[in-house]
Amino acid sequence: MFKKILVANRGEIACRVMGTARKMGIGTVAVFSDADRGALHVQMADEAVHIGGSAAADSYLRGDRIIAACRETGAEAVHPGYGFLSENAGFCDALTQAGLVFVGPGPDAIKAMGDKITSKKIAAKAGVATVPGHMGLIRDDEEAVRIAGDIGYPVMIKASAGGGGKGMRVAHDEGEVREGFARARSEAASSFGDDRVFIEKFIEQPRHIEIQILADAHGNCIHLGERECSIQRRNQKVIEEAPSPFLDVATRNAMGKQAVALAKAVGYASAGTVEFIVDRDRNFYFLEMNTRLQVEHPVTELVTGIDLVEQMIRVAAGERLAIGQGDVKLQGWALEARIYAEDPFRNFLPSVGRLTWYRPPQAGEQDGAVVRNDTGVFEGGEISTFYDPMIAKLCTRAPDRAMAIEEMSRALDRFEIEGVAHNIPFLQAVMDQKRFREGRLTTGYIAEEFPAGFSGVEPEPELGLRMALAAAVAALRERDFRGGGKSAGAQDLSVLCGEQRWDVKFRREAGGFCASFDGAVYRVETDWLPGCSIAAFSFDGMSLLFKMRAMAGGFHVRYRGAARDLRVLRPSVADLMALMPVREPPDLSRFLLCPMPGQMVDLHVAQGDIVEDGQALAVVEAMKMENVLRAPRRARVSRICAGVGDALAVDAVIMEFEEA
């Protein structure tokens, strides 16, 4: 067994690998860029080596510097995690030539499965079902349009060397093919250094289900069941689970058999994932094989009890698998929710900044349920523009799916993040949806359920009232702790939220408050203290966990995707609030503003051009994804304020308009 392993990655996956290595008694070496000098994975490792600048191309993608770090520290093997160099056959070859071990499959398997065109041909030869499409290289958009027409719309345009949703576009007509072809090639070149794309039929109402496989260098190969990864946004997974609520035993066995056949066809030896698209009739088609550890691997670990990183290390050290297919048992249900630094209220645009408050729920097992949080950040750390915006992967496991979902909802309730925008409110909203709880999933779920984007959840009247009561009781308790003293008798308070108003009479009772509103009486109890951001309230025995933040005259209260700014006032003051003028927001319609921090990579118009509603104006790259900015209406471009290559801040003015 190895004595020391270098982890050629960063963030949560680097921490994850180091955790298993430490459990196995193996020393660890971290590598880090300028931006990651104080990162959690650097603190966690036994040794750390600086390998370059903040951009991945200057550090984590520099195989030569990683090899030099191995020589400097005496590391015998390299675990690549996922992303960066994890599926780079050239890096694998270079390690071998340097006398080092790559913790992953051999270069031939990486090459074969890393190219989506080649992999589909191998899969078809191995008897694996594949999606209809054009597997040859496509020269230009004219050829792309012709091929798409032959296949039949809608089609999927995909980067041959792609992954993680990059270099991928769905097209429903000729115009979308032309634009999607250009964008897919550009993203593919930027992210993978390879602009080749291909086109295949887009399966409507599909489910994304993948099979985890394990293989050694001695011819042994097994599968560990499936993961459902259908909840996606922009082709990137958001929520995953194991097993799938859709598969039956026969389909699971058939998919597992084909996944193993493909792995054996390429001489695979390590952990890997074979991804399938599954239609409404449980017909399944091969998408791709990921020759690395998947982001969502924890859910498989939670239902099988198998540490995939440990197995990868043991296989890389030449050991035989100690697990046979008959040893694999799926027990319980597991969910993973990816927590990203992104603003769901602004079309999920990336968010950067310092984590001023980071308190995840307590991990561990209690009453048959498990909470696991894989993360690479800490309070006071920074989310930068250079890397993926993932903050954490929150996982839960319980005896069945309904219990796992409820445990996830409770864990999200207890997850506190401040300093950057994050998607926890969105994840909470999905967990509470009837369709999700029933398991009626497709890869179009988010677009179908949130066609206008996510603007929060409108609370039911009873929940809205409880949020108002919580704000009022918090105001009373705050007054107590600031020296106001507990006033005797009843108190009248008014709670305002926009044009809504609740007039409530409060009376203190032993251990809580009695609140009278609209002829009904509520018993409200809480142990909340001023300054605490999580508040547990009981309303006539019903427990709710709110997130609360003090604001001028009241509290900002959140509950599972619902958020309210609640002002707590004396009734006489509330009467006067109706007479206050309302500040009109500034008119920004004549500006094109940058919606996220990023770099301008393309500009399609010039000063004086007349643009039409929806016309593409500019492309901004943020966290390796290209975002097309479009005209909000017909207008004339009166001024260009930014150029290609410029680094842009949030709300930076890109151009100004005037009436056409």
Image (cartoon, helix red, strand yellow):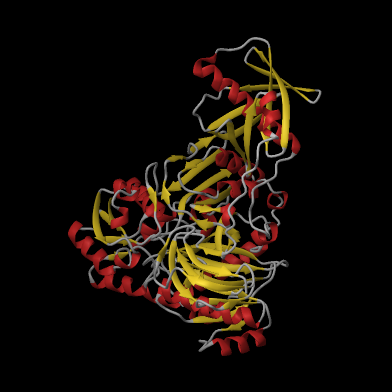
Give the residue furthest to the left.
Answer: 72
Q: Is residue 251 left or right of residue 224?
A: right
Give the residue furthest to the top.
Answer: 488
Q: Is residue 315 left or right of residue 196?
A: left
Q: Is residue 200 left or right of residue 193?
A: right
Residue 562 against residue 298 in the figure, above or below: above
Residue 224, given in percent of the width and then of the height, sits at: 53, 58
The residue at the point 48 percent across, 63 percent down is 653
* Viewer-nearest residue: 27 or 463: 463
The residue at the point 36 percent across, 56 percent down is 10
| Figure quadrant of the C terminus | bottom right
* Viewer-nearest residue: 600 or 47: 600
* Quadrant hosting residue 218: bottom left
Residue 593, given in percent of the width and then of the height, sits at: 52, 62
Residue 539, given in percent of the width and then of the height, sits at: 69, 26
Please tell me how many numbered marks the rendered image carries: 0
Q: Is residue 243 visible?
A: yes
Residue 574 against residue 279 in the figure, above or below: above
| Figure quadrant of the N terminus | bottom left
Q: Is residue 640 left or right of residue 256?
A: left
* Viewer-nearest residue: 491 or 474: 491
The residue at the point 41 percent across, 67 percent down is 269
Q: Is residue 122 visible?
A: no
Residue 619 against residue 271 in the figure, above or below: below
